Image: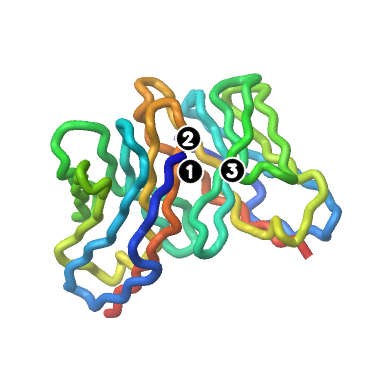
Amino acid sequence: NAGVTQTPKFQVLKTGQSMTLQCAQDMNHEYMSWYRQDPGMGLRLIHYSVGAGITDQGEVPNGYNVSRSTTEDFPLRLLSAAPSQTSVYFCASSSLAGGTGELFFGEGSRLTVL
Amino acid sequence: AQSVSQHNHHVILSEAASLELGCNYSYGGTVNLFWYVQYPGQHLQLLLKYFSGDPLVKGIKGFEAEFIKSKFSFNLRKPSVQWSDTAEYFCAVNAWGQNFVFGPGTRLSVLP
């Protein structure tokens, strides 16, 4: 059982470049989300989705785009990378049944923007 | 809006010492409470969770947490830490139908 899979694990970009972080889960979870982790700031929610075709903004959505065409996949797109987007990104998923599901996290993607 | 605060940014303990990490949240309704652990270079893993019932919950690796509703607190405890407990610990809250909110994290360093 793979759980939540993120790729790539590491990426270096130049300012202005675009890229997509991939996230896939095989647990049939309705809820998927992207967080960024910065020192001393915990995890901040970027975007989330409660099902295929439904996405919404989190706390820090600017500069990021998402889509949810299938239950399994939830890619995060950086439209024009900026140094402020240097961070570790985590994808997480959860079952919404009963509203008490825990979050399952991917391994993380470390992004450096030069 | 919900928020979560964690009392300590960095805690340094010797092996066998007891641990208590503080967590307070602000939300007036019914919440679910979680503690996650992140070992160096790894992703977040669930330590324990509280949904309802007994306010003292036990998790993996000897950790436990107590929910005190009147204090809006969910403190994490372990009677005797090990070097392998060195990690960052995150408290998180969510209410039904709402997103998770994480605290800023507490870094625990256990000296051998």
Looking at the rendering, in which quadrant would you find the C terminus of chain B?
A: bottom left
Q: Alpha carbon of mark 2 to alpha carbon of mark 3: how far? A: 10 Å
**Disc 1 element:** strand
Q: Position of residue A19 (x, y in %)?
A: 77, 46
Give the color scheme: rainbow, by chain, secondary structure or one colour.
rainbow
Residue tagged by mark 1?
Answer: A105
Q: Position of residue B69 (x, y in %)?
A: 21, 41
The answer to whether marks 3 and 1 sit on the same chain is yes
Residue B109 found in image quarter? bottom left
Q: What's the mark number on residue A59?
A: 3
Q: Position of residue B41 (x, y in %)?
A: 49, 62
Q: Identify the amino acid type marked 3.
A: Glu
Chain of the residue where label 3 is placed in the rendered structure: A
The answer to whether marks 2 and 1 sit on the same chain is no
Q: What's the mark number on residue B99?
A: 2
Q: Alpha carbon of mark 3 to alpha carbon of mark 1: how far? A: 18 Å
Q: Nearer the viewer, residue B99 or A28?
A: B99
Q: Residue at x 54, y 24 (%)?
A: A50
Q: Residue at x 32, y 51 (%)?
A: B24
Q: Earlier in the sequence, mark 3 or mark 1?
A: 3
Q: Position of residue B59 (x, y in %)?
A: 23, 47
The answer to whether marks 2 and 3 sit on the same chain is no
Q: Nearer the viewer, residue B68 or A44?
A: B68
Q: Alpha carbon of mark 2 to alpha carbon of mark 1: how far? A: 14 Å
